[in-house]
Image (tube, rainbow, N blue to C red):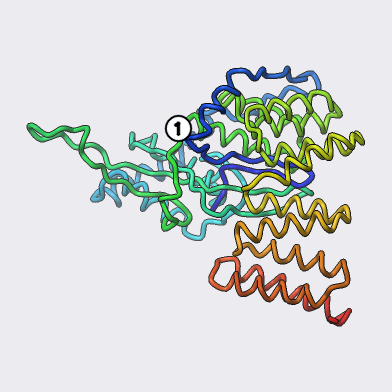
Amino acid sequence: MKLANILMMALSLAAISGCAGQSSMNSVAQAHAKAQMPSLNSALFRPQQSVVSAQQLFALTASQQQDFLLDFNDRLSDLPEHERISVYLQDLTFGFNYKEQTYTASEAFALSAGNCMALAILTKGLADLVDVEIKFQRVTNAPVFDRNNNIVLVSDHVRARLYKPLEAAKEGENKTLLKRAWVVVDYFPSLASQNAEMISETEFLALYYRNRAAELMVDGLVDEAYAYASEALTYTPKDSEVLNILGLLHGRKDDASTAEQLFNYALRLDADNLNVLHNYQALAKRQQRHELVAKLEHRIQSIPEANPYAWIALGDAAFAQNQLDIAMTMYRKAAEQAPYVHEAYWGQAQVFVAQGETHKARRILEKGMREAKMSATKARFKTGWYSYQEQAQKKPLK
């Protein structure tokens, strides 16, 4: 299913930025050139010896290699090499347990579990054994939305491509112009490829270390998360999302000064990064810097486009603080941008109920059901609708 960018929000937010439009590339490049990376306060974090290396990430155990090679060279030997890996993985992952966890190749193999990035990592581990070319794609379809330990996780989708080995060029044939066949290894290989971009192995590794940093942070393992975020920074030193995680981690170590410097630096690189703006605002609120809070709120509200799940997380945060008007604005922004996302309607319904407008809550949920009717989120929305009805039985609708 999905992963790859973990956007952590919700009282803590971190995400991956989308593709920048060509019109903004020059200004982004200028900001990158001028911005100066603040010093990290590494002394706050215990050194970690357990950070997985790139080599360890894709490595398989001797027995796992033997199991794969036995099938690759025997049972599947009538297929092209790239297809052998695909078929082997189809067999191996039959009944694979999707789990929002970025396992290494050997872990995913042993546990028959993991997220989409874990599946891509396992695929590369197998491909490297038999010298089959592999590339990675990031798919920008609607991400998964989940909540864990007061952090909202939003994940984009990563998948692998396995390429058919190049054949010897015929006389007079330009080898560089030949089209090459490939197979996609994915939980859902039918996802629209027009919403995909190729990423380098360096970018893929950066995503891995950032994902692990986010997962460890969710688990409260701040020192371990810092080690992985720092490793991600070595691959993408000006990634605003990695800097965002580092800012959050410094905040958890009560170093508000470094956290603020990191948030400001990230915003110089990516001025409209909603996740950084939200976390910077949360820091300012804790410090009771009301003028800065208002300034950041204005910037947040003025952003024309954002991931709908980011608006939902902001709505949830506002609702938790009884800021009902702000919460409603955030939920409506999400619904306008992605009318199929059921959480946007459920959030509005919560606000209406809190305002005593239960008849409006019912109407907005009915609208959400209509919008979700043709989407994959229908079943999850119906669960929420039934839950709302159960609550309403205790307090009849007006």
Q: Residues within 10 Å of mark 1 (few under 14, many from 20)?
A: few
**Image-quadrant location for residue 53:** top right
* Image position of 339 with respect to 141: above or below: below
Which residue in the rendered view is the most extreme toward the left?
171
Q: Residue at x 68, y 30 (%)?
A: 267
Kindly identify the residue that appears in the image at 50 percent across and 45 percent down: 158
Residues 340 and 220: in front is 340
Q: Is residue 66 left or right of residue 98?
A: left
Percent position (x, y) of residue 281? 80, 38
Identify the residue at horizontal 52%, vertical 37% (top origin): 20
Tell me, yes or no, if residue 373 can be seen here.
yes
Tell me which amino acid carries mark 1.
Ser
How far from the left and from the top, in percent, is residue 50?
Answer: 66, 28
Residue shown at 76% from the left, 73% from the top: 387
Q: Position of residue 243 (x, y in %)?
A: 68, 29
> In the rendered image, which residue does mark 1 sit on?
200
On the question of residue 109 being in view, the answer is: no
Q: Work out which quarter of the rendered image holds the C terminus and state it.
A: bottom right
Q: Is residue 215 above or below residue 312?
A: above
Q: Compare residues 199 and 293 and report the one nearer the observer.
A: 293
Secondary structure category for the residue under label 1: loop
- Report the number of numbered marks: 1
Residue 16 position in % (x across, y down): 60, 39
Horizontally, residue 276 falls left or right of residue 179, namely: right
